[in-house]
């Protein structure tokens, strides 16, 4: 499920994912945004999609 969000985000907001680590209460990313894309845009898209997905299915 998580990697589906990341793949969709890469297609939507264009960035390179170099590495990530899933912790107990957060996720660390090492990414390189494409030209014209800010880190804030990328994280906003990922967090928004994950939030809507988890609340839709009652997993929050």
Image (tube, helix red, strand yellow):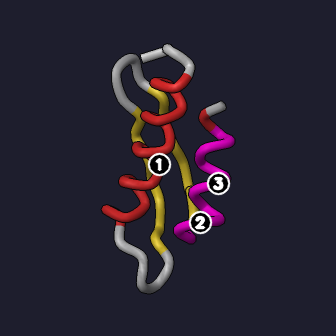
Question: In this figure, which residue is indicated by the disc labeled 2?
Answer: 12
Examine the rendered structure and indicate whether residue 44 appears above or below residue 53.
below
> What is the C-alpha distance between the residues marked 3 and 1?
9 Å
Residue 57 x/y as whole percent: 56, 19
Q: Judging from the image, what secondary structure is the residue with disc 2 in?
A: helix
Residue 10 x/y as whole percent: 60, 61
Question: In this figure, which residue is indicated by the disc labeled 1?
Answer: 46
Question: In this figure, which residue is indicated by the disc labeled 3?
Answer: 8
Q: Judging from the image, what secondary structure is the residue with disc 3 in?
A: helix
Quick check: marks 3 and 1 in contact, CB under 8 Å? no
**Which residues lie in the magenta part?**
3-15
Q: Quadrant of residue 24?
A: top left
Residue 28 x/y as whole percent: 40, 40
Q: Residue at x 36, y 29 (%)?
A: 26
Examine the rendered structure and indicate whether residue 8 appears above or below residue 20.
below
| Magenta-drawn stretch contains 6 | yes
Q: Residue at x 66, y 31 (%)?
A: 1
């Amino acid at each position: 499920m998580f990697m589906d969000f990341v793949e969709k985000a890469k297609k939507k907001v264009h960035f390179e994912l170099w590495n990530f680590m899933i912790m107990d209460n957060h996720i660390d990313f090492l990414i390189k945004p494409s030209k014209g894309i800010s880190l804030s845009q990328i994280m906003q898209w990922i967090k928004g999609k994950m939030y809507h997905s988890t609340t839709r299915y009652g997993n929050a």
